[in-house]
Image (spheres, rainbow, N blue to C red):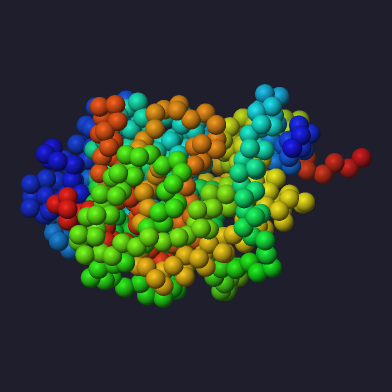
Amino acid sequence: MKRQDIIELAELVRIDFTDDEIARLEKEIPSVLQYVSAVQKIATDVTEVDPGLRRNVLRSDEVVSTKPEDVEALLDSAPVREGRYIKVKKVLNVD
Amino acid sequence: MLTKYPTISALRNAYLSGNYTPIQAVADAFAIIDEKDKEIQAFLELYREEAKHEAVLATERLKKEGDNAPALLGVPIAIKNNILIKGKKTTASSKMLENYVATYDATIIERLREAGAIFIGATNMDEFAMGSSTENSAFMTTKNPYDTKRVPGGSSGGSAASVAMGAVTASIGTDTGGSIRQPASYCGLVGLKPTYGAVSRNGLIAMGSSLDQAGPLTRSVLDAEIIHCVMAGLDPKDATTIAPDTYPDVPVKQSYTIGVPRSFFEQGIDTSVMKVFDEQLEKLAKAGHKIEDIELPLFEQGLAAYYIVMPAEVSSNLARFDGMRYGLSEDGDTLREVYGKTRATGFGAEVKRRILLGAYVLSSGYYDAYYRKAEAVRSMMRKELTDMFQKVDLVLTPSAPTPAFVVGEFSDPLSVYKQDIFTVPVNLTGVPAISVPADHVEVEGKALPVGMQFIAPHQGESRLFDIGIRAHDKIQGL
C-alpha cells in the first residue's frame, strides 16, 4: 500500500486527512491488512456464502408517524434550516 | 444508605419491606457519584432533576401497588451514550455528535421506562463504540474503580464503571465485538451479549449492524436476566428482531457438557487469568458438569474475519455523518469541502482508521480478497459452532486474555484489537454469551477481577442464566 492509495481512499470516504495522519495510516493499515489476510487461507472456496435468516420484513406502504412536533424536532437538528427545508451547498454544478 | 451495593432483587425487597425507598436510592446514587465520579469519570451527563422526580412517583407507586409494581420500578440505571433518550444529548462520545439531541426514545429505553427503571445518567464510551478501554472517547477516559490507574474496559467502560463504583444498580451497554463482556470482566460484573436479533437495535447508534446487540451489565446473573427479559422481543421498528421460536429450543439441564477450546488459549493469555480459569473448571466439574476439551479451529481465526466485516459495516454506517442533517457541520465553499472538513474534525483517530480500512476491504478489486472471504469464514464459523453444539451444551473461555490494563499501555492498534480475541467470534456467529465474574488476581497490590465467558447456541439465553446463577449467584449468596 502506497501513500497514493491512502490519499485515494481518503477521497472515497470524504475525510480531509493531515499529512501526519496519512503518514501514520500508511504504516497502520498494511499491518492490520496483513493480520486479517489470514481469511484468504481459510476460505479457499467461497461459492456458497450462507445468507443467514431470510424472511419478508416489508410493512404496508402507509405513513405511520409524522407528528408535527417530530418534523420540527428533526428539522431543528439540521445545521442550516430554511422553513421546512434543510439548506445545503449546491449539489450539481452545471457549467 | 444501604450497607451493601444491592442487586435488583435486594433493592426490591428493601422497597417492599418499607426499609428503603426509590427517593433514598436516587439520593444515594447521586451522593456516590458526587463523591467518586470526579476521579472515575463514568458519566458524561447526569439526569438529576428527572431522576428525582421519577423517584417520587416510583415511591408513591410502590406504596400503592406493592409486589404488583413492574419489575424495575425505582431501580437506578445508567445508559451508554449511544442509546437514544428523547430530548437528551446522545453523543456516542464523539465530537461529531457533541451537541446532538435525540428526537426519539430507543425501543429498549421505552421498554425500560415502562418497567419503571429510573435513568440516572449517560455513560462514557469509546467513540462510536470503537475500542476496548474508553481511551477513544473524545471527552475523557473512564477509570477502573478497582484500580484507578487502569481502564474499565470498553467500549461500554462508563457503563461498567458506573455499576462497579456503586452509583447504579445496573447499566445498559452495547456489544459489537465484546464491548459489554470485556468491561464486565474488568469491573467484576455480569455482562450479557444476547443472540443477534433478540433485542431491538432501533435507537442505537449503529456501528456494525450485523453484529451489534444491547445488553445489561449487572451485579448478578439474575439481574441480567430480569433486564434482558424487559428489553428483548420483536420490534416492528427493527426488521432483524426475531420471534422467540426462531431457533430450536435450548433446554435447561440438570448438568451440562461444557466444551473448552484449550488450544485457543495458547497465545497471549495471562498466566494469572489461566490459573483462575482452571480453578473454575474444577469447581464446575465438582458441581457435576462434564468438562470436555474441544477444537474450534475457525473460532480461533475470528479476529481476522472480524477486522474485515466490522470496519466494512462501520464505513457504511458512518457515511451518514455528512454535516448536512444533524451533528457537527464545518463550513466550506462546496459540498465536498463541508463533507471533508466535518468528517476530519468530527471523527477521532480510531474511527477514521476503521472507516478507511472498511472502504479498502469493500473497494473494487479488494472486495473478493477481503470482504467476501471474511463473510465466507463467518459462514464456516457458524457451521463449526452449530456442529459443536451437537456435542456440547456450552462453550467456556476466559472473557479477556488479561485483567484490566493500565491507561496508555497500548500504543499500536493491533495489540488492543487482540483483547477481543475470545469475544468477537460470538458476535460473528450471532450466538449469545455471558461474562460472569470468576475471581480476582493480585496485580501490584490490587485485586483485579477476571471473568469467564459462557457461550450457548442461538436463543440459549435461559441456559446461560441457569449456569450463571449456579456458578456465580448461588456461590456469592446473591
Q: Which residue occupies the foreground of this view, B246 or B240?
A: B246
Task: Report the residue at 22% width, 32% height from top.
Answer: B31
Task: Report the residue at 47% width, 70% height from top.
Answer: B387
Q: Which residue occupies the foreground of this view, B338 or B7?
A: B7
Task: Report the residue at 20% width, 61% height from top.
Answer: B287
Residue B143 in view (yes/no): yes
On screen, residue B207 versus residue B64, left or right, reads right
Residue B105 in view (yes/no): no
Total marks placed: 0
Task: Report the residue at 89% width, 42% height from top.
Answer: A94
Q: Which residue occupies the foreground of this view, B327 or A35?
A: A35
On screen, residue B177 versus residue B293, left or right, reads right
User: Would you place residue B431 above or below residue B56 in this image?
Assistant: below
Q: Position of residue A65 (x, y in %)?
A: 52, 61
On screen, residue A71 versus residue B8, left or right, reads right
Q: Position of residue B60 (x, y in %)?
A: 16, 51
Q: Position of residue B1 (x, y in %)?
A: 13, 37
As drawn, which residue projects farthest toward the right? A95
User: Would you place residue B394 above or below residue B218 in this image?
Assistant: below
Q: Position of residue B72 (x, y in %)?
A: 25, 55
Q: Quadrant of residue B404?
A: top left
Q: Quadrant of residue B253?
A: bottom left
